[in-house]
Amino acid sequence: MLRRHAQALWAPSNRGYLYQLIAAAGWTSLPWLPLLPQPLALIEVGASAGLCLLPDRYGYDYGRATFAGEPMLRCAVNEATPIPDSLPQIVWRAGLDLNPVDLADADQVAWLETLVWPEQAERLANLRAAIKVAAANRPRIVQGDLLGDSLARLCAEAPKDAHLYCCGPTPMLKAFEAATADWPRAQIHVEYFTPKQEADKKGGFVVELARSGQEFVIPEGKSILQVLLDAGVDVDYSCELGICGACEQRVISGTPEHRDAILTEEEQASNTKVMICCAGCKSERLVLDL
């Protein structure tokens, strides 16, 4: 799911989803967290009690690999799931919330428990165990929202050699980009859930596949990806919106018209790769490493 390396993870959430996730059968982000450059710094928006800021303090059972700890989160995986060799190395963490939950307040803890359905006994047990971990470790939670300067102040506290990563709804991404405006662009990474731009389907150019020698005229109204799939070419793809990166291809020659939300401005300017689900072409011919 993640296409960009990051040394600081931005984890958006809301309370209902957050605590269903913690009490559920697994922590879905753990497989890719250790794959990022270490150590990590975590910033969470909507942190509530900060349970999602402690992925390195829990236990995980992935069937073919287990990491000791409590709660023990059992996770269903398949062969494509990247099982880590170790837990992530997290050296700095902080959260932001309009109304942080105080785990020393029994009423607030009871409210968290109501977010788990009554029949989900294992989830409730996991939630209670995670609350104990958070109560003992006390992750820092700042009261504030995206509309003030709290976000920018937290970003400013992150290690200066860190890479900051953000995924979530567009308004939050814009707030994140504004808060990190003075950071080097190479250290800022965002993943959109909706397209930043409409796909370029003007057509009128030729796509050449360098390895097979095949050539295709891209007509108006169709993307490069659609034309290749219609012709039976085996290419990876997923979202078809330019937001996942699955269809990325290496450009040998030609000038793409980029419309994706994956590549940085520098990467787009280099014209060395392209997302074929949404890109057009500024030149008459685009040669791909396919």
Image (cartoon, grey):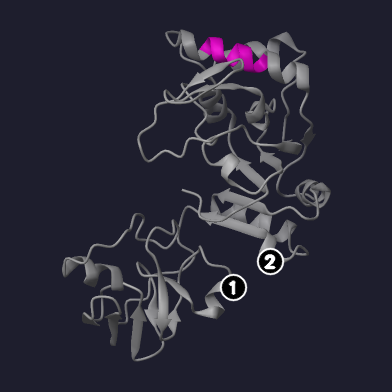
Quadrant of residue 88 in the image? Answer: top right
Number of numbered discs on residues: 2
Q: Is residue 288 above or below residue 65?
A: below
148 sits left or right of 279 in the view = right
Which amino acid type is shown beneath numbered disc 1?
Answer: Glu
Residue shown at the point (51%, 37%) measured from the top left: 31
Quadrant of residue 131 in the image? Answer: top right
Q: Which residues are magenta?
A: 124-131
Residue shown at the point (67%, 65%) measured from the top left: 186
Residues tagged 2 and 1 counted as in contact (Cβ below 8 A): yes
Residue that mark 1 sits on: 265
Lower position in the chain sequence, tag 2 or tag 1: 2
Task: Tell which of 109 and 154 is nearer to you.
Answer: 154
Residue that mark 2 sits on: 185
Which amino acid type is shown beneath numbered disc 2?
Answer: Arg
Q: CA distance from mark 2 to mark 1?
A: 9 Å
Q: Magenta: predominant secondary structure element?
A: helix
177 sits left or right of 77 in the view = right
